[in-house]
Image (tube, helix red, strand yellow):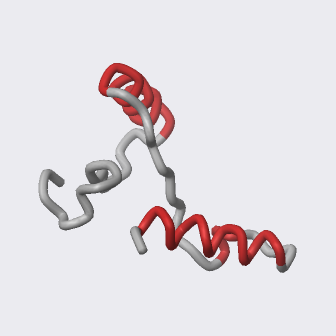
């Protein structure tokens, strides 16, 4: 199972229970975009989450921590 798969499973479980996922799981975003869309999305994140630290990992199929 991938980390994104784990998140999707947990999210579905908590929603099925009528619970807020993020009361139990850290805020999580799965960005599945091409390079141009991802760059634009990250620029928007910078404006909204200015000053916060984010860890962005490579997409699916690269779940070994390489390229973080």
- The quadrant of the picture occupied by the N terminus is bottom left
Q: Residue drawn 79% across and 69% down?
A: 15
Residue 5 located left or right of residue 38: right
Residue located at (28% from left, 54% from top): 57
Above-or-below relation of 64 to 30: below
Residue 27 shown left or right of residue 64 in the figure = right
Q: Position of residue 63 (x, y in %)?
A: 26, 63
Kindly identify the residue that appears in the image at 74 percent across and 76 percent down.
14
Residue sitting at the far right = 18
Question: Which residue lies most toward the left here?
Answer: 66
For this rendering, which residue is in front, 47 or 25?
Answer: 25
Residue 34 at x, y percent in the picture: 36, 28
* 3 to the left or right of 9: left
Q: How many marks?
A: 0
Please tell me which residue lies in front, 49 or 4.
Answer: 4
User: Which quadrant does the C terminus fall into?
Assistant: bottom left
In this picture, residue 22 sits left or right of residue 31: right
In percent of width and height, residue 56 lies at 30, 51
- 52 w.r.t. 15: above or below: above
61 and 45: which is toward the camera? 61
Residue in view at x 66 percent, y 68 percent: 11
**43 or 7: which is nearer to us?**
7
Q: Residue 36: horizontal and vertical position, in percent? A: 34, 20
């Amino acid at each position: 199972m991938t980390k994104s798969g784990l998140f999707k499973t947990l999210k579905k479980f908590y929603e099925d229970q009528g619970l807020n996922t993020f009361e139990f799981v850290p805020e999580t975003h799965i960005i599945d975009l091409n390079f141009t869309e991802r760059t634009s999305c990250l620029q928007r994140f910078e404006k909204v989450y200015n000053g916060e630290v984010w860890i962005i990992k490579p997409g699916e199929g690269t779940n070994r921590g390489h390229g973080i």
